[in-house]
Amino acid sequence: MSETFTFVIDDKEIEGCFGQTILEAAEEAGVYIPRLCHLKGLTPFGSCRVCTCMVNGRAMAACTQPAAPGMIVENASERVTEIRKSLVEMLFVEGNHFCMFCERSGDCELQGLAYRFGIAAPRYPYLFPERDLDASHDDIFIDRNRCVLCGRCVRASREKDGKHVFGFVGRGPAKRVQVNAEAALAETKVAVTDEAVAACPVGAILKKRTAYRVPVGERRYDHEPIGSDIEKRRTAAAE
Amino acid sequence: MNHENTSQRIVIEPVTRVEGHGKVTILLDEERKVQQARLHIVEFRGFERFIQGRPYWEAPVLVQRLCGICPVSHHLAAVKAMDLIVGVDRLTPTAEKMRRLMHYGQTFQSHSLHFFHLVSPDLLFGFDADPVIRNVIGVAKSFPELAVQGVMMRKFGQEVIRCTSGKKIHGTGAIPGGINKNLSLKEREFLRADADKMVAWSQAALKIAKDYTAEHLATLKDFGSFDSSHMSLVGPEGEMDLYDGRLRCIDADGVKIFDQVDNQRYMDHITEEVRSWSYMKFPFIKSLGPDKGWYRVGPLARLNACDRIDTPLAEDERREFAALTGGQPNQISMAYHWARMIETLHSAEKIRELLDDPDLQGSELMAHGERREEAVGIIEAPRGTLIHHYRVNEDDQVTMANLIVSTTHNNTPMNLAVEKVAKDHLSGVEITEGLLNRVEVAIRAYDPCLSCATHAMGQMPLSLQLMDHEGRLLDERKKG
């Protein structure tokens, strides 16, 4: 076992190992740091910044910043939550997220974050960008209206599936997820069982013909806010 | 209002106590006689367009957002079409009965809402009563027990919807090929606890509508009434069926124009035309043409078109209803209310009957089949026949959607009712609020849902305009 040390998150002493990020060490200790682009088992990416914490007084992404002895991390404070709320609101307005009919509603990490943060409506104007759908594949479809550019599909396809099906093209507002084919997803090697398909945190990459199978009331975030599973570990450990 | 001019255009805007936004314009000639009266639907939404490109399984959840009053109708009409798209001609018993329960719950709540909240002020206080009391608050103050029943009946219907679709409004229960949940024993017992009371309360509400019609028959016979054809779905033996069946249309004498028409062939018999002054289309029976081919839908049409009702209490009431006109179609616009309450009782009986059916606790929720490209789903929504027609490409995307909504079928009849009431009651007299309310009363009989009918956007209420013979706006009434 690697050497351990302690650091502080919100006045609580946390144990960490060298090589762990702040987010990983926090998670192990049952402290939930909100995140979107981070997915356990994939290389940290640091693109969404939802896991932003104040580390020794400076804003840093907890998913990429290694934990270090004596660090003072501010996670659940009002000012940090305010930063995260703004980031999530910006994600909402820069895409076309219509939760009311989206099949990932109740099971969507972006929506889950909005509920956790108490976001009733974004304070920024909607951009209503023109985005397209790729329904060419028999079993999978991409709805870019809902893509938050977290890159989880890109990394999962590369690191887990060994396929390189997804990648980013364009810059700034023009940036989007592209598939490794002349035209559309049907021409790629993607399979419905790929980790890349399961990795999408929102309703952008979906398995066809599976929508709304889970009734309202039984969906992942219908009764408990996102992150509750991690926080329960801490409660369980305390007992 | 001002009446200093000799020739006038009256505008009622918005028309109140209806679902949606519209206005009425009444054109008077130089002698202040009503020349023309029209109901204009001024909303526009475009659901048929923005469903294009979306995956077909989204349609039942997306299009129900047309409405917050009877979204279940759109949910079920769309999913019935999508059942066929996924090649399912017959659902599992659990799926069909869960959907029926959902639909009866919705008919029950929607009819209750309309009767108690929107219409009862006119019936209980009279058309000319002070508008300060002629509203739902007035009803709550003067008839508290009745008002509570209205609220509780609506609540019961909404609970039925929640137990079958997951949410009281805009649930996700019905999915192409089946349903995503059965009815738990806990949910069944929860609903059963009130089922008998709902039947009893429906009978009491029905009595109000029936007695009102009998008491005012002499007036109501002419009030916005006219001969017309009537269309609805009926079951294989001509029985009333709100969830499924085939199309039947009868003429003003009760003679069948068509019967047992396959839903997929509705276009062989019905088509629509557009007129410049309304966002709502005008459907008509092809064989009779646009001038004579219009017809009515909804509770009155369903009572006229069906041969019987398959629940005992509602069937007794239907017989009494039919006896009034000697078995001939009832053409009294205001009899919609009576018919609506017979359907409320029928829905309550159906809910009670279904709750005893063990199929609702079954576990076979989905059926499967071969994909198809085009399908039509038709349902009897609370306000009448609702048609959803879709085409889906091989990538599972919707390429065409056509929705013919209940209120759209009733477009010409509502305009005729408005015109008749305006000519009979507003010609050559001093226009009062009570007289203008009569125009709205006639519209309300049809329980129109104007936002659904145009699949439209914007604020809800409706308005009335009075114009002179040269089209100058003379008087305008806006509410809400």
Image (tube, rainbow, N blue to C red):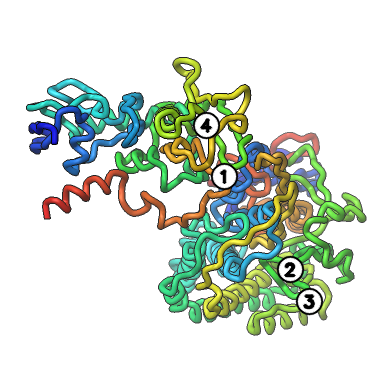
- Give the image location of residue B36, x and y in percent: 80, 46
Mark 4 sits on what residue? A145
Circle nearer the viewer, 2 or 4: 4
Q: Share a chain, discs 4 and 1?
A: yes
Q: Which secondary structure lies at badge 2? A: helix
The local crowd at label 2, few if under 14, some if 14 to 19, many if 20 or more residues have their Cα within 10 Å, is many
The local crowd at label 3, few if under 14, some if 14 to 19, many if 20 or more residues have their Cα within 10 Å, is few
Q: Share a chain, discs 1 and 3?
A: no
Q: Is residue B450 above or below residue B469?
A: below
- The residue sitting at 78% across, 37% down in the picture is B276
**Are dots 4 and 1 in contact, CB under 8 Å?**
no
**Are dots 1 and 2 in contact, CB under 8 Å?**
no
Determine the CA span between mark 1 and mark 2: 39 Å
Circle nearer the viewer, 1 or 3: 1
Q: Which secondary structure lies at badge 1? A: loop
Q: Quadrant of residue B219?
A: bottom right
Q: Looking at the image, can residue B435 be seen?
A: no
Q: Chain of mark 2?
A: B
Q: Which secondary structure lies at badge 3? A: loop
| Towards the viewer: B420 or B378 | B378
Q: Chain of mark 4?
A: A
Determine the CA span between mark 3 and mark 2: 14 Å
Going by the numbered disc 1, the residue's amino acid type is Lys
Going by the numbered disc 2, the residue's amino acid type is Arg
Mark 1 sits on what residue? A208
Mark 2 sits on what residue? B302
Q: Share a chain, discs 3 and 2?
A: yes
- The residue sitting at 50% across, 18% down in the picture is A169
